[in-house]
Amino acid sequence: MKSFDCKMCGSCCEGKGGIVLGPRDLARLATHLRLSQTEVIDKFGQSSGTKIRLKNGDDGFCIFFAKEKGCAVHTAKPDICAAWPFFKGNLVDKESLHMAKTFCPGINPDISHEDFVEEGMAYLKANHLLADDSTREANALIL
């Protein structure tokens, strides 16, 4: 991929309220963690209206991220995580992509917005990462 090469820095794992668990995510995490969906929500989630969001640790990172080890659920990570940096904002707004380039070392700083959008849309479609239920899934995945 010429627009993005993840450096595993964790910058996208930091910040409160950004990691929404859609229905597929919850099922995938429950299977991966060998817990019921209710147990996953009780241990690792918090309600936010009609959505479930992953909790943050005391360090401000996603509860599953550790700087020394990376993502503890990488193979079962939520769709919103798998989609990074191809979020709606970065796809529809050049300035949003420009800001993302300043904190994410994995985004090619020389990629044009047009090439980023083309590659990003192909990636999202190929990996079935577009969402269509704004009440239950991350709005950043809805185009």
Image: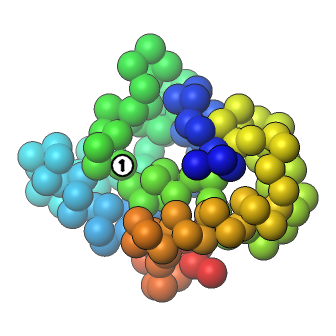
Q: Residue at x 31, y 71 (%)?
A: 23
Q: Residue at x 56, y 36 (%)?
A: 6
The crowding category of the residue bearing disc 1, from other C-alpha atoms within 10 Å (few below 14, some 14 to 19, many at least 20), is some
- Please indicate whether residue 55 sits to the left or right of residue 60 in the image: left
28 or 90, nearer to the observer? 90
10 or 52, nearer to the observer? 10
Inspect the image, locate mark 1, and give the three-letter code of the amino acid beneath it: Lys
100 or 65, nearer to the observer? 100
- Please indicate whether residue 64 sits to the left or right of residue 58 in the image: left
Q: Which residue is mark 1?
A: 77
What is the residue that sits farthest to the top in this orientation?
68
What is the residue that sits farthest to the bottom in this orientation?
132
Q: How is the image coloured?
A: rainbow
Number of labels in the image equals 1
- x, y percent for residue 104: 71, 37
Q: Quadrant of residue 109?
A: top right
105 above or below 131? above
- x, y percent for residue 102: 83, 37
Q: Residue at x 58, y 29 (%)?
A: 7
12 or 2, nearer to the observer? 2
- x, y percent for residue 66: 44, 23
64 above or below 80? above
Q: Would you say residue 33 is visible in this rendering?
A: yes
